[in-house]
Amino acid sequence: MALWHWRNTGRLADTDGKFLHSHGGHILLAEDGYYYLYGEYGEFSMTRQVGRKVSCYRSRNLMHWENCGVVLSVDTPRAAYHLTKHTNPTLQRNPGPAQEARWAGWNDRVQVGATIQRPKVLYNPKTKRYVMWMHWEDGKGFYYAHAAVASAKRPEGPFTYHGSFRPAGEMARDCTLFQDDDGTAYFIAAGRDNADLYIHRLTEDYMAVDECVKCLFPDQFREAPTLFKRNGVYFMLSSECMGAEPNQGMYSFSRELTGRWSAQRPLGSPTTYDTQPAFVFSIDTPQGAQYFYVGDRWNPSEFYRDARYMVLPLYFPDDTSIDMRWCDGFTFDPANGTLQEEVRETGLSRIKSRVVESKGGYLYPAGDKVGCRKLDYREEALLWRLEPANEGRYYIRHEKSGLRLTYGLDGKSCFLAAADTGYNQQFNIEALFDGACRILTQDGLALTVDQELPQAEMALGLAPRREIYDPAWGCDPQAFNITTVYPND
């Protein structure tokens, strides 16, 4: 492999110039010398899911990706394989009136036959087949929580679909695969309505579950699991169950896969650099293996349509610690193991209200006030600068308009105004738990989201500072996250 040049800005295109769609994916280095990238391909809106498939791309240098086409879809051939007594053999499922009645009122998604998420592929050296595991749903909701299996003779397919089921009777949503040094394979999936992570040991042919061997992080509601091994130590990466909203990724380690795992530790920034874990892979060098984190940067306003891929080098201060930091791009030379990072600081921030945690309430100008809006990485109206003021305080300036956040002398109102040296444009930032903060006036009042207004009209005001903050609740109208903006294009 020659020099690898990677940029974490812009959208990745294939060799035909089309945007690469392979989300929640996985890279496999096959025996033919190609890196194969498998992932979700589809278009998405909040009311309709269309054409959810599994795509495949391949590359020899990790820069130029050839589109191998769709390797799994509702038209994929099916072949019976004994997985469990309750295996559903069909990929496309028509739920019928009873199931439609079960979902009545839950959402208005149009039935499209199947939803496939987080497809992962391993090569089985004994059977000489490529085996894919994934999360399967019926295309309308997330009631079934099935694992699904497919296999192929060649890494680029065609794959044959073998059915879906609940492994060891447990739910299986966000998932991953892992192949240990001795060739034993494991399927890891979020179960019990996402409350726990289960590790399932697979049969020797990787086609079925042999045994559920471990329940990880009970009641901690983790998703996007990613498992890898380095120097005899297992690492599990995961995110909060926040869907497309960026959040603090965490990692845990163990020296025995089925033994005791460490407490979880933060991975990267409070938003994991605006990514969710997809997978970790390594490249061998004369100085040892270099590990790389690959994360999906979903855009909550567009989801698949504007999703990007971020690749960040991983560093290990010791055998049980991970250091991951932002870089705009890098050049990696596997011949000697050298890696040169490129970093550009934007100096920008987004300010998120914790009162609309599940919806993403980011501050933006709303007329002469300041309101809350859903996250969109392309939206300049969500960008702010925190500029030093007097005695450790800050000016909060809106980047696009140049206006500063200002509070009224009535002790209740908050708005944007032209920059001046007035004390009512200076704020104290008080740290809370869980990466949150309060934004306080010099008089000790706190910026507060008015919860009496509809969410689309929520505006900032002032109120006396609250003494109680419960980070598990996460909905304090005076709690905010101020997050660094990382380049997106």
Image (cartoon, rainbow, N blue to C red):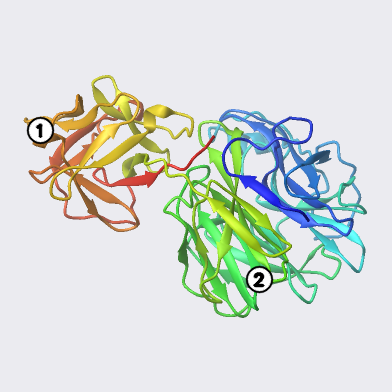
Dot label at residue 358 = none
Q: Position of residue 129 (x, y in %)?
A: 90, 59
**Residue at image point 37% right, 41% down:** 347
Q: Is residue 69 left or right of residue 314?
A: right
Disc number lying in front (2 or 1): 1
| Residue 285, quarter of picture | bottom right
Is there any visible trace of residue 172 in the rendered image? Answer: no
Q: Identify residue for label 1.
A: 422
**Residue at image point 58% right, 55% down:** 340
Q: How many marks?
A: 2
Quadrant where the C terminus sits is top right
Quadrant where the N terminus sits is bottom right
Q: Is residue 152 left or right of residue 357?
A: right
> Would you call the spot at circle 2 few (<14 residues within 10 Å), some (14-19), or many (20 or more)?
some
Q: Is residue 228 left or right of residue 379?
A: right
Q: Position of residue 472 (x, y in %)?
A: 35, 57
Q: Identify residue for label 2.
A: 229
The image shows residue 68, relative to residue 419, as above or below, that is below
The amino acid on which the numbered mark 1 sits, given as a three-letter code, is Gly
The image shows residue 166, relative to residue 198, as above or below, that is above
Task: Give whichever of 233, 111 is nearer the camera.
Answer: 233
Q: Position of residue 211 (x, y in %)?
A: 73, 72
Where disc 2 sits, the SS reads strand
The image shows residue 245, relative to residue 411, as above or below, that is below
| Residue 122, quarter of picture | bottom right
| Residue 425, quarter of picture | top left
